[in-house]
Image (cartoon, rainbow, N blue to C red):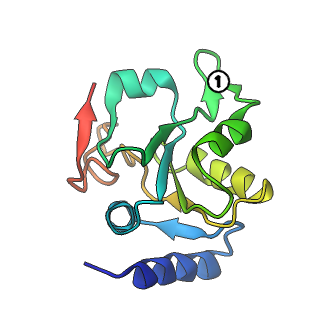
Amino acid sequence: MSTLEQLYAQAETRRTENQLPYAGAVSPAEAFELLQLDPRTRLVDVRTRAELDWVGRPLIGDGQYAHVEWTRYPGAVPNQEFIAQVNQVASHDTPVLFLCRSAARSKLAAIAATQAGFTKAYDLLEGFEGDKDGQGHRKTVSGWCFRGLPWIGA
């Protein structure tokens, strides 16, 4: 197990190497460790309600998980209340790990949160389901589920 300092240093290294406009990026395993080590850390799942219902969600400590849609389903309409809703689950100095299906929307959420004043907004790399394999299936090559981290199925 790593220390908080080591985990944040790795996230910072990724920020610097990739010139990220937010605090940094963490792997699924690092995110799980951060959640274990720091009860203030929040995992904000930005997938749609339908994705949670059909696919599942991470299983983590009480009060550490929040669902705030980046886009609304159906129609992929941007959630105009996104930042206001994140403000309801985290303060601007709370470590916030943004998660989506494959780490695309989570990057956008981390950027938006940073622009809104969140100083510890992180992208959770690989997402919940990860990339598609050669047959077009997810959960087989990367992501929270593939890494064997706890989750609740649909």
Q: Position of residue 61 (x, y in %)?
A: 32, 49
> In front: 34, or 88?
88
Q: How crowded is the residue under tag 1: few (<14 C-alpha within 10 Å), some, or many (20+)?
A: few
Q: How many marks?
A: 1
Residue 82 screen position, x and y as percent: 69, 36
User: In the figure, 142 relative to 11: above or below?
Assistant: above
In terms of secondary structure, where does tag 1 sit?
Answer: loop
The residue located at (28%, 53%) in the rendering is 141
Could you tell me residue 62's position as x and y percent? 35, 44
Judge from the rendering whether residue 60 lies leftward or rightward of residue 126; answer left or right: left
The one of 84 and 14 positioned closer to us in this rendering:
84
Give the amino acid at mark 1: Ala
Establish if 85 lies above or below 10. above
Name the residue rendered at 33%, 29% in the picture. 55
Identify the residue under disc 1. Answer: 76
Q: Quadrant of residue 89?
A: top right
Q: Residue at x 73, y 51 (%)?
A: 112
Q: Residue at x 63, y 40 (%)?
A: 88
Image position, residue 16 (x, y; %): 63, 81
Quarter location, residue 77: top right
> Does residue 83 appear left or right of residue 34 in this picture?
right
In the picture, measured across the screen, residue 59 lies left or right of residue 118, that is left
